[in-house]
Image (cartoon, rainbow, N blue to C red):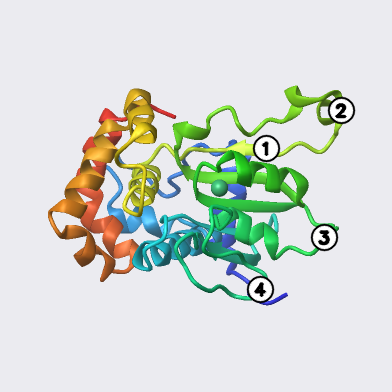
Amino acid sequence: MAGCRAISARAAAPLSRWLAVGGGLILTGMTSALPATPRELWSELDDPWREAFRQGWEAFRTGNIPVGACASTPDGVIVHAARNRVADRNAPPGEVFGSALAHAEANVMARLPYRYTGRLVLTTTLEPCIQCSAAIRLGPVATVRYAGADPLWDGCHDFSPLSPREAARPAKVTMAGPRGDDIGVFATLMSRLGPGLVRGPAAEWLRASGQGAVLDLALHLQESGEAPRLAALEVDEAFAYLCPRLRSLRDAQVPG
Ligand SMILES: [Zn+2]
């Protein structure tokens, strides 16, 4: 289908290794005690991860909530990638825009054919919300990999307690995340650079959940004028630029 592309064997390898440990951080090639450089960390991302971040960064640049996602086969072939479009006035055919439904994962799921028989991997930059989790539950997704923690939606991914029928359904969705590295913190920070969620009741909940430092940095980037300058960078460049501050945030953040 449109958007399909093959990935290299080198890029596909980290996907299987990452899944094999249930989403735990894999830093292949790290043999010394020195922390990985931002470039080294980014180079370890497989193509679905990079595409999800590229989509999320485009959402940031276009004034949407900065979250990106893509569906891929278990061996890493991307089936469809999409981004958040809550503030957009148009979208590619088959995707949703301009409403609270227009989340990145929902737009990926909207482009997967009805009764698609694959068992796909859904890679997303942020822990899925309850709405997207329900769409994923009804779609051909076996595994969700997410980078950044979003405590607003902890506990909203398992539908088994809702009904005996849900509890009895054999095909469960495996959740793998959040990433425990700087890229995971970057993903959460990125999601807070867009509209909403840095102030108000949701923000208070996030602060109570241990994400106050992330929200403070997001506010600082927006109020200091750094955020528009960041938008001019590519996503990997923005990650490298922010990495020193992400590392101190990682120490302060309570795991989601
Ligand atoms: Zn969502």
Taking the spot 27% from the left edge, 43% from the top edge, the residue there is 35
Residue positioned 27% across, 39% down in the render: 215
User: Residue 168, labelled with which disc?
Assistant: 2
Q: Earlier in the sequence, mark 2 or mark 1?
A: 2
User: In whole angstroms, how far apart are the C-alphas of marks 4 and 3?
Assistant: 15 Å
Name the residue nearer the viewer: 46 or 109: 109
Does the CB distance between marks 1 and 4 fall below 8 Å? no
Marker disc for residue 174: 1
Point out the frontmost of discs 4 and 3. 3
Are dots 2 and 1 in contact, CB under 8 Å? no
Identify the element where label 2 is drawn.
Answer: helix
Q: How far apart are marks 3 and 2 (CA)?
A: 21 Å
Q: Position of residue 54 (x, y in %)?
A: 44, 65
Amino acid carrying mark 3 in the image: Tyr
Nearer-N-terminus badge (3/2): 3
Label 4 Cα neighbours within 10 Å, binned few <14 / some 14-19 / many ≥20: few
